[in-house]
Image: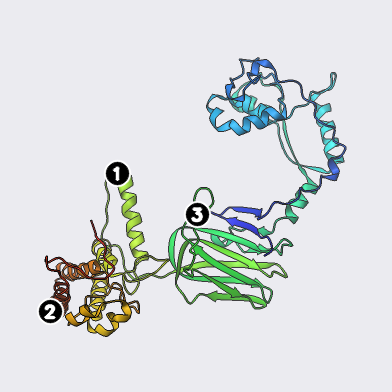
Amino acid sequence: MKPALIAAALAASLIVTPVQAQTPAPSNPYLVNVPGISLPNVPAYLGLIGSIATFKPSVAAKPYSMAPSLPREQKVALMQAMMGMMPSMGIRDAMSFMSTKYKAKDGLTFDDVVQSMELRANTLNFKKVGHSPMWKDIQAVLGDKEAPRMEVFHYCDIAAGREVLKAATVSTPDAVITGRGEVVIQPDGQGDVELIYDLGAQNIGYWQLEVNAGAGTIIDIAGIEYINPQGKVQHTDRYRNDMRYICGEGDNQFTSLMRRSGRYLFLTFRNLERPAALRAVRLVESTYPVAPVGSFACSDERLNKIWEISARTLKLCMEDTFTDCPLYEQTHWVGDARNEALIGFSAFGAPDLARRCAKLTAYSLDHKPYVLGEDAGVPMEYLHALRNPLTISQTPSTWDIVIPVWSFLWTISTWDYYYYSGDVEFLTWVYPYVIRNLKSARAMTDERGLFSAPYWNMALL
């Protein structure tokens, strides 16, 4: 596979990095005649002789006097230990580490130096892009009439700027998030180009694209939930949370047919024969239609945040049933649904969703051959002993798995729903199913009266 360039637009920012190490760029031909830098030894008063860890701030100096320059090696050492030393470093010392200084020859005026610098910049094709006569502002605004003449000039290397522009595989990557325009993806000789968008939070819904591209351009889209602080991606492995779109020539508009979830979207452009213009990338959220009916607030902001995250997570797990998670199995696990329903009553109401989940699970008792059988690994003695099976662990399903504790939680959930809704009609309907479920469980007790069955048994503490 060809190496890819990763253009990451995380929180509306761009990173373009090669997947594998690249050869150094050729030296700038315009800089070959620039003289080398010869710097004096580090003065002892800066406290940098010896270990960099023993850095001490410079002693008081005459106002407006120039601090001495520092060798590159000392600057590198400082940058490596910067985080630990910043508390003891003043702005004067910090500026010394970030600058290279040249002493003007005796007899030259300030204007002579400025004119020489501008002539040299012109020779090197450096374009002046900024000029600030700071000493005038200091005198006028701060009233410091002793401030010496100090001016800041900004130059741009034209050749280097051109190379930066030429190397920009992706322009304005945040445009489709901020609504400021389109993202232009240039073909790259090294391989594919990948955009990474941070949606800010977990979401679920249908992906939409609007793109102008050449025929045969491939766009692979994948959603993931988490990238750790070190940049490691939590891939979804066997769960198919990705898709491929093959472009036709010109304008393309696409909405995915499958609901998918994630916080980060990876868009990988392959087979680029000409620039592609990404005009929109969206996620059309799709959850059960509910509105908040409950709220929580206290003096502890951590608890307030926990409530906010919990309510949001539950909403992402609400489809035509409660599901265990928005990205991975997206399954109505009976035990999960019971606990989700309890929170759903407080946060969103949604008794109709709890009722549907309870009824779907009850229906599994009407299909004994579908639920239990020798193919499911249930011994014949249990099959002969049972007239009615337990409810299965997820409904509707073709996976013939019984989790007894889920069956018992389902029994409790039927009362939870009645207690919240007062729905007597439902209670009357579900009562025979509850009795069948309990009788099945009683038939699977041993000589000590303890439940014992060859199912997926787990304990809830």
Q: Quadrant of the C terminus?
A: bottom left
Could you say which is closer to the camera, residue 41 or residue 395? Answer: 395
Q: Where is residue 222 drawn, in percent x and y?
A: 53, 66
Specify the amino acid type for callout 1. Answer: Asp
Q: CA distance from mark 2 to mark 1?
A: 44 Å
Write down the residue under mark 3. 227
Write down the residue under mark 1. 300
Write down the residue under mark 2. 428
Left of 222 or right of it: where is 297? left
Using a 10 Å C-alpha cutoff, classify the residue at mark 3 as few (fewer than 14 neighbours), some (14 to 19) or many (20 or more).
Answer: few
Specify the amino acid type for callout 2. Answer: Thr
Left of 49 or right of it: where is 381? left
Looking at the rendered structure, the secondary structure element under dot 3 is loop
Q: Quadrant of the N terminus?
A: bottom right
Examine the rendering and report whether any part of residue 230 can be seen.
Answer: yes
- Ranked by sequence position, the earlier of labels 2 and 1 is 1
Q: Are marks 2 and 3 in contact (CB under 8 Å)?
A: no
Q: Where is residue 427 drawn, in percent x and y?
A: 14, 76
Q: CA distance from mark 2 to mark 3?
A: 49 Å
Q: Are marks 1 and 3 in contact (CB under 8 Å)?
A: no
Viewer-side label of 2, 1: 2
Q: Are marks 2 and 1 in contact (CB under 8 Å)?
A: no
Q: Quadrant of residue 419?
A: bottom left
